[in-house]
Image: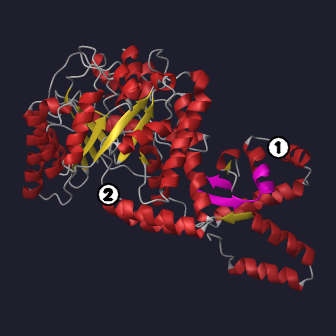
Amino acid sequence: MGAEKYTREDITGLADLARSGLAAQLDTILARQREIVALDFEALQKISMLMPKAANNGICGLGCAAAERVAERGR
Amino acid sequence: MNTSDIHTLRSARINVAFHPESLSMFNVSDRVARILELFENSRDISEIARELGIAEKHIRGVLRLLDNKIKRLSPKPTHSKPDIASQLVLFVTQGCNFKCRYCCSRGLYPKHSSMRLETGKKAIAAFLKLYPNNVKTIVFLGGEPLLCYEVVKHLVKFTLRLCRSSRVDIVPRFGIVTNGALLTSDVVKFLKRYGIMTTVSLDGPLAVNDFQRILPSGEGTHSIVMSRIKTLTRARHSFNIEATVTRRTIECAISVREILLYLHTLGAEISHIMPVCGEDEETALPWRCRQSIADGFKDAASYTMESLLTQDPVWLQYVRYILESLIRKIPRKYLCFAGLGTLTVFPNGDVYPCYFLVHDSLLMGNIHDSNFPNERFFRVRKLLLERAKDSITPCKACWARSLCHSCYGFGFSLSETLSAPPEMFCLIQKAMIEAVLLKLAEFRVDSRLWHRAISTLRAELSRAA
């Protein structure tokens, strides 16, 4: 699902809170944690090995035509 | 956390907080999205609290939580480091058999000349010797490079011979950007045999193309190019198409998505569709239509992303650039690689960072100089290395800075400075980046869509590699 995993530190922190009876705070923290969930794109990075090592085929961000007219005027 | 550290994106299905420096995304609730949007718009905490009716401490808590999550992410991605001469562009001729309304060969260069075989050989030999294994691609450009077909042919064979007889392990791939008119079956056979990546210029349907891409006689070129594309298709030589979106495209009420589909139907593997920005009344896109133009590019980028869920992806080149950075997790530090990775050799042997950056102050030397590359070469390279996005005022505070792919061409031709491109160009880039990020996030939270998209991407990349 792409949900992040809680770290040991998180769990210990939450357990401490629970033990100290701060249930309301625990609820708030858990609710807030659920409001911001890192999306895991590990599978995307895994396919980076397949990316061609070569640069592109000469097409740049702008290409020939886009700046040409401006270039002509600028000279 | 600074306001430029986060950008919030929304769709009907998901809210996303994007962190440009780490190229990471977070799925956020409506409440958090609203807080972040206001924060990004430089509203202070008390103002946000008042507007949303939330206690200030909760807003601080949300920002702190996000900040902690960002810090906890995997190591900060490294910026891309361009290798010298990873792409060698041989500008083999300034001559052309077309006389397109917007072409640089009409005015940018003082006179037409073509590259002698010896100059091309010297350039290739010099860079392969100086930076063995750096040169990944050699691109033939013009004018119309196929006017110098014999030179191109000899240079391809020369390079391969040279690689065989020297200590070069990585044999460069070749590319050519052509108007297509001279793609006879013999030429196509040669391109196919040597795996030369071929890009044909065609500005979409006849009504647009024949208005601006014309022969010296004034006649349109659409039918000529179409018949040559058939030659490529018959020979099963894969090719890309490069098209521009101009004022004419708007007048003909043709959308970017329609152009993309049109080029895909013709068999283009990847379509590179570029907006013509600037002040020219005949061709440049009108500023007053900027939002609808940006929306048009966004729609086309979304279409490409949606097509990843099928077996037949419809590739817009810009989307590939954006995905490439996200897949590699490498932010784009520079507007472009001119003078860093890419070097352009002109017919007389002059070396410039790019065919748009032609100016005495940017001349990197001449391939015939006995001491090439000399102090001039490294001075210009240093100048360009120092022009990273974080040194350009509008770029350094822009949320899209890690993913945009741009060009110095516009700014340089107007003011001879290496400045940011026109605002409209940036608007279009940002619109496409938003489309890609949102779609990726939508796919990610639905495992069925995610696996389909990843499987298509994997197949596409395996094929390209």
Nearer to the camera, B208 or B368: B208
Label number found at residue B44: 1
Residue A35 visible somewhere in the drawing: yes
Residue designated by label 2? B464
Answer with left or right where residue B328 lies relative to residue A36.
Answer: left
Q: Earlier in the sequence, mark 1 or mark 2?
A: 1
At x 79%, y 59%, the residue is B62
Magenta stretch encompasses residue B26: yes
| Tag 2: amino acid | Ala
Q: Residue at x 62, y 40 (%)?
A: B397
Task: Measure the C-alpha gap from mark 1 to mark 2.
Answer: 48 Å
Whether residue B393 is visible here, answered yes or no, is no
- Residue B161 rendering spot, x and y as whole percentages: 7, 52
| Label 2 environment density (alpha carbons within 10 Å; few <14, some 14–19, many ≥20) | few
Q: Which residues are magenta?
A: B14-35
Image coords of residue B209 (percent x, y): 36, 26
Q: Nearer the viewer, residue B322 or B209?
A: B209
Residue B3 appears at what percent x and percent y? 70, 45
